[in-house]
């Protein structure tokens, strides 16, 4: 496997609220994963839907080294959950590229999501409230002809700015753009609870919404800006009620096949997200993950910087490799969410 595949944790593994660090190999890490969690028999749930009342652990992970300082998740067995006191809220924000050529990748994400939902419901304690929302990478309506060479846009900074309409300047009126949530089946985001016996509604909603986001968005993709402006007061009419602060974990997952052209700088978008998590503690309550074009690592693209701007390195993979979807958006990521959920709930 290439060194740019699935990264998280660095060369050490973090276990429990006090973050004990161990330098260990693949088998030892798997053992540590098991040691960090007790079995969790909480049933899965979904708001407003029907489906399978059981949850499965999804795909586990074996671990190696990554050139980016993380670790590589490469298959494995099922993980186990934890019947422990944890956070009360988990908010999952998906930023989905809706530019032309993205349809097949949206399909792959929609197929991977049910196993991820199963793993989340299995690993998290009972009565954790989940929110799942989707926004897109587009900030402009109209002509968006743009090209990329060597993982860099050939457009000038002025052209990029001309295709970047901030919601603070104007609402372009397009569903799911400028950081607004993509409304699907009458829902701007989906709410569920890990104590619900049925999660099929969540799975059905996400599978449909991820594909319905479509391929009509602007080719000047702005995923970092989309994540940031999702939390901005300018979008409170569409996104209000999604983000929870105290005792809540926020996970941002990006799906995009091109480098990020967000022009305002990583810190601006990071600050927008941490602004909705002040009581929880900002960085430590925010996780990132991505299925992206692997070229963004080599050029230190804005999206690469954004994914690494928070407390821990992301889990990430190559969106062009269909086998990586269930590994990135799967059991390993659910384990990270569960671990962080345990940590942020520890009394200060």
Image (spheres, rainbow, N blue to C red):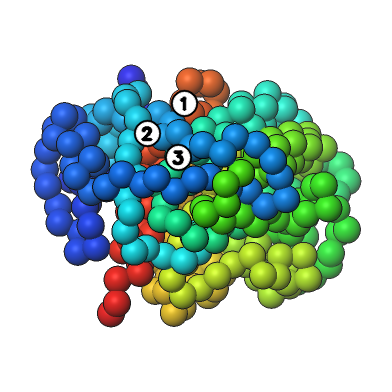
For disc 3, the neighbor class at 10 Å (few under 14, some 14 to 19, many from 20) is many
Q: Secondary structure at mark 1?
A: helix
Quarter of the view holding residue 343: bottom left
**Does the CB distance between marks 3 and 2 fall below 8 Å?**
no
Q: CA distance from mark 1 to mark 2?
A: 8 Å
What is the quadrant of the N terminus in the image?
A: top left
Q: Which mark is residue 294?
A: none
Image point 52% across, 54% down: which residue? 195
For disc 1, the neighbor class at 10 Å (few under 14, some 14 to 19, many from 20) is many
x, y percent for residue 69: 26, 42
Image point 61% across, 54% down: which residue? 192
Q: Which residue is mark 1?
A: 324
Q: CA distance from mark 3 to mark 2?
A: 18 Å
For disc 2, the neighbor class at 10 Å (few under 14, some 14 to 19, many from 20) is many
**Does the CB distance between marks 1 and 2 fall below 8 Å?**
yes
Left or right: 264 as drawn, with respect to 88: right
Q: Which residue is mark 3?
A: 119
Q: Which residue is mark 2?
A: 6
Q: Secondary structure at mark 3?
A: helix
**Does the CB distance between marks 3 and 1 fall below 8 Å?**
no
Left or right: 83 as drawn, with respect to 246: left
Image point 27% across, 37% down: which residue? 71
Q: CA distance from mark 3 to mark 1?
A: 16 Å
Above/below status of 292 relative to 263: above
Quarter of the view holding residue 178: bottom right
Image point 78% across, 54% down: which residue? 187
Above/below status of 325 relative to 254: above
The earlier-in-sequence mark between 1 and 2 is: 2
Using the image as rendered, state which of residue 348 and residue 193 is in the foreground: 193
x, y percent for residue 215: 78, 34
């Amino acid at each position: 496997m290439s060194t740019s595949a699935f990264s998280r944790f660095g060369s050490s593994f973090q276990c429990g609220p006090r973050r004990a660090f161990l330098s260990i190999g693949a088998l030892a890490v798997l053992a540590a994963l098991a040691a960090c969690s007790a079995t969790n028999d909480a049933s899965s749930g979904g708001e407003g839907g029907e489906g399978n009342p059981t949850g499965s652990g999804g795909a586990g992970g074996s671990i190696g080294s990554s050139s980016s300082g993380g670790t590589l998740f490469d298959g494995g067995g099922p993980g186990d959950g934890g019947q422990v006191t944890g956070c009360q809220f988990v908010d999952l924000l998906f930023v989905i590229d809706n530019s032309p050529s993205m349809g097949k990748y949206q399909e792959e994400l929609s197929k991977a999501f049910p196993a991820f939902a199963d793993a989340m419901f299995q690993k998290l304690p009972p009565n954790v409230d989940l929110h799942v929302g989707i926004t897109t990478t587009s900030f402009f309506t109209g002509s968006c002809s743009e090209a990329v060479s060597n993982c860099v846009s050939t457009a000038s900074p002025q052209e990029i700015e001309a295709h970047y309409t901030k919601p603070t300047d104007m609402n372009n009126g397009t569903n799911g753009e400028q950081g607004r949530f993509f409304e699907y089946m009458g829902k701007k985001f989906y709410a569920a609870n890990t104590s619900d016996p049925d999660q099929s509604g969540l799975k059905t909603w996400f599978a449909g919404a991820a594909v319905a986001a479509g391929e009509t968005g602007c080719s000047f993709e702005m995923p970092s800006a989309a994540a940031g402006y999702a939390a901005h007061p300018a979008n409170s009419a569409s996104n209000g009620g999604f983000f929870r602060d105290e005792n809540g974990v926020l996970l941002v997952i990006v799906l995009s096949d091109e480098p990020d052209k967000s022009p305002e700088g990583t810190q601006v978008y990071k600050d927008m997200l941490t602004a909705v998590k002040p009581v929880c503690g900002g960085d430590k309550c925010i996780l990132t993950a991505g299925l992206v074009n692997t070229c963004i690592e080599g050029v230190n693209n804005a999206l690469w910087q954004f994914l690494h701007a928070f407390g821990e390195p992301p889990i990430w993979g190559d969106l062009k490799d269909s086998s990586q979807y269930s590994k990135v958006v799967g059991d390993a990521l659910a384990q990270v969410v569960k671990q962080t959920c345990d940590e942020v709930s520890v009394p200060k």
